[in-house]
Amino acid sequence: MDEVKQLVNDIKNKNLKPIYFLMGEEAYYIDKISDFIETTVLAEEERGFNQMVLYGRDVSVDDIIGNAKRYPMMAEYQVVIVKEAQDLSRTIEKLAKYAQNPQPTTVLVINYKYKKIDKRKALYKTLKKTSVVYESKKLYENQVADWIRRVLSPKKYTISPKAAQMLVEFLGTDLSKINNELEKLQIILPEGTQISPDHIEENIGISKDYNNFELRKAVGERNTLKAYKIVHYFADNPKDNPMVVTVSLLFSFFSQLLHFHGLKDKSPRSVASALRVNPYFVNDYITAARNFPMRKVSTIVSTLREFDVKSKGVGSNSVSQGDLLKELLVRIFN
């Protein structure tokens, strides 16, 4: 986010570069930077003649270069934005020649989503000298809750750790999807609100009681009654609670628990740092460690690998998701 803020500030201050090559697995920041350039560099009355949006599937690299070499009309700059430029991956290196001597009155924005150019080749090396190359990396799951808090903070909202975790478990690491849901909540809730699990349940439709977070907590506490209730709910709502996600999250939890058992320093701050979790959740690991000794955790990790394969339909085609989850709980608790 700090790199994005610096880019945005430079653009605001008209410290513009001739080419912005935006690439990487996470589309959210690529779209944000591109949209900011589209709405900021030119005044509204200048855009008609001096701003164009092209799509990679419809143009060639030569077309892009041809447009970039034009001069602006009654404006200081022209802006050329190429969306879905990853469709030009086979020929994108041809842009290197233009990058060596780009048109100084053109701001060329290349949105190269879900891919990266080869950093050993001429295009990347040339762009690094003359322009901006921004790589938008996918966040790890344990980084997303902190990202949610940082996004909400300047907008005068906060979010409880459990509510943030519910969003991550339901929406994964897709920042665009998460941001869309956060924007909905900001429309509904007044400034200064702390977003709670109840707000998530009421407005997004994620159950605050029957979700993977609560299942993980129930398993760690050896609360068999609660765990089986949640699994029964999952069995009745398989589309909203795919088994492959449940198994993956349980695998992550028990892998971290194995790591916890091996820690010499089990103070909350040290555990949070070592496991890369919010300090709010450290007690969950302390409780689970009491209930599941290291040898049992190792066995459970192996069991979860087995059920990961089964959740993908290998060797269990005739067994329902609900029955597989119940069998998994039996194996974990016994």
Image (cartoon, helix red, strand yellow):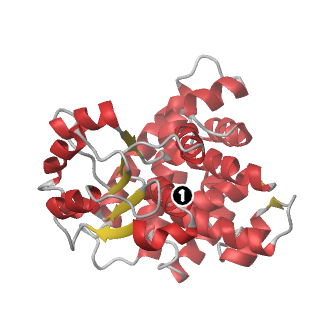
Instruction: State how many labels appear.
Output: 1
Is 202 placed left or right of 220 in the picture?
right
In the rendered image, which quarter is residue 283 located in? Answer: top right
Residue at x 59%, y 16% (from the top left corner): 264
In the rendered image, which quarter is residue 267 located in? Answer: top right
Residue at the disc numbered 1: 36
Name the quarter where the N terminus is drawn.
top right
Instruction: Report the residue that reaches farthest toward the front.
Output: 74
Can residue 41 be seen in this snapshot? Answer: yes
Is 302 placed left or right of 10 in the picture?
left
Residue at x 22%, y 38% (from the top left corner): 100
The x and y percentages for residue 93 are 15, 47
Residue 284, compared with residue 271, is above or below; it is below
Residue at x 67%, y 68% (from the top left corner): 183
Camera-nearest residue between 272 and 55: 55
Instruction: Report the residue that reaches farthest toward the bottom.
Output: 236
The x and y percentages for residue 8 are 56, 46
Secondary structure at badge 1 equals: helix
Camera-nearest residue between 96 and 32: 96
Q: Residues within 10 Å of mark 1 (few under 14, many from 20)?
A: few
The x and y percentages for residue 284 are 68, 43
Can residue 334 be seen in this snapshot? Answer: no
Camera-nearest residue between 308 and 152: 152
In the rendered image, which quarter is residue 195 located in? Answer: bottom right
Residue at x 71%, y 68% (from the top left corner): 208
The x and y percentages for residue 244 are 40, 64
Camera-nearest residue between 259 and 180: 180
Residue 189, compared with residue 318, is above or below; it is above
**Amino acid type indicated by mark 1:** Phe
